[in-house]
Structures are given as C-alpha cells and as structure tokens.
Image (spheres, rainbow, N blue to C red):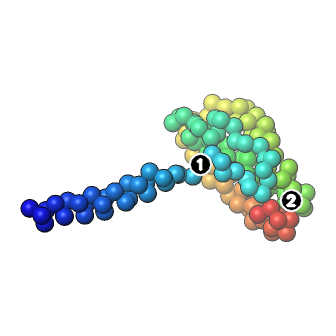
C-alpha cells in the first residue's frame, strides 16, 4: 500500500512540474513582428491580400507577386535602394487587379503567374545587390 502511495505521489510531482511551466509559457505575439523590419514605415498589405477568401487566394498570390516585382523594378530602374522604392504604395497593384486582371478566372491567373514570377525573379536578382549595399536586404 505504501509503495503505491509513493508511486502516485511521484507521478503527481512529475506531472505538476510541466503543468506549472506550461502555465507561465506565452506564445510570441506574431502581430508585433514587422512585415518589413528594415523599413518600418513600409505600407502594410491590404486586407484583401492578407486575409483572402478561399476564392481570392490566387488573386492574393498574384497581387503579392506584382507588388514585389514593382518594388524590385523601382530599385533597378533607379539604381538605388530606398524603403520608398522597394516598398511602394499598394495603389498601383490594387488598380491593376481591378482593371487588367478583373474578371479573369482562376485558371487564367494560374497561366499568368509563372511569367510574372519569372520577371520578378529577374528584377530581384538585379535589385538584391543594390539593396544589400544600401543595407536594406
């Protein structure tokens, strides 16, 4: 009888430790993490890009790719890297999504995304050294 009481007590002590540790454990607040830490004043992604509906996932992906391409192209064309060039307003992308890409199907999006990604990669490869030199990569 004494042995089972000791075993029960030992199990209680062993199990109590992790519970106490878990009670004091806090997950990091991911909302506090800045999207662009080198450029804290960079415009935030629009709500429709950040939290797209299921139907809007492809549109969000395309918009993000267009935005990145715009920023890298700005850097390459200017030959310098600033926060304003690398992280411009989302207005041009939003306008393009409402005009050039309005009404196209998900499958049409999937057809154009690879070409846009290829162009983005080219601009990124050219712009990366410029931004590294400026301390913004």
Q: Secondary structure at mark 2?
A: loop
Residues at marks 1 and 2, CA–CA distance in whole angstroms: 30 Å
Identify which residue is drawn at 52% across, 51% down.
26
Residue at the image point whose x is 48% and y is 53% from the top: 24
The quarter of the picture where the C terminus appears is bottom right
Q: Nearer the viewer, residue 61 or 9?
A: 9
Does residue 6 appear anywhere in the picture?
A: yes
Q: Who is closer to the viewer here, 56 or 23?
A: 23
- In the rendered image, residue 122, in percent from the top left (x then y), is placed at 74, 62
Image location of residue 7, percent across then percent down: 19, 64
Is residue 78 shown left or right of residue 41? right
- Going from the N terminus, do you reach mark 1 or mark 2 first? 1
Q: Quick check: 67 left or right of 27? A: right
Q: Quadrant of the N terminus?
A: bottom left
Query: Alpha-carbon neighbours of circle 2 within 10 Å: few (<14), some, or many (≥20)?
Result: many
Picture quadrant where residue 52 is located: top right
Front in this rendered view, residue 89 or 3 = 3
Can residue 65 be seen in the rendering of this structure? no
Residue 105 falls in image quadrant: top right
Q: Residue at x 25, y 64 (%)?
A: 10
Which residue: 63% across, 30% down? 103
Q: Is residue 112 above or below residue 91?
A: below
User: Is the residue 131 above or below the residue 108 in the image?
Assistant: below
**Residue 66 placed where, x, y %?**
71, 47
Q: Which residue is mark 2?
A: 81
Q: Nearer the viewer, mark 1 or mark 2?
A: 1
Residue 14, image x, y percentages: 31, 62
In the picture of the structure, the residue carrying the numbered disc 1 is 29
The secondary element bearing badge 1 is classed as: loop
Q: Which residue extends farthest left?
A: 1
* Mark 1 residue crowding within 10 angstroms, few (<14) / some (14–19) / many (20+): few
């Amino acid at each position: 009888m004494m042995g089972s009481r000791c075993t029960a007590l030992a199990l209680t002590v062993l199990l109590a430790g992790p519970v106490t540790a878990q009670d004091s454990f806090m997950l990091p607040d991911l909302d506090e993490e800045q999207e662009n830490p080198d450029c804290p004043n960079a415009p935030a992604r629009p709500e429709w890009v950040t939290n797209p509906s299921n139907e809007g996932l492809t549109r969000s992906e395309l918009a993000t790719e267009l935005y990145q391409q715009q920023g890298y192209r700005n850097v390459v064309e200017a030959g310098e890297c600033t926060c304003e060039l690398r992280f411009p307003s989302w207005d041009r992308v939003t306008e393009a999504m409402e005009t050039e890409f309005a009404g196209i199907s998900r499958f049409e999006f999937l057809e154009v995304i690879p070409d846009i990604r290829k162009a983005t990669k080219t601009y990124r490869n050219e712009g990366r050294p410029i931004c590294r030199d400026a301390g913004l990569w």
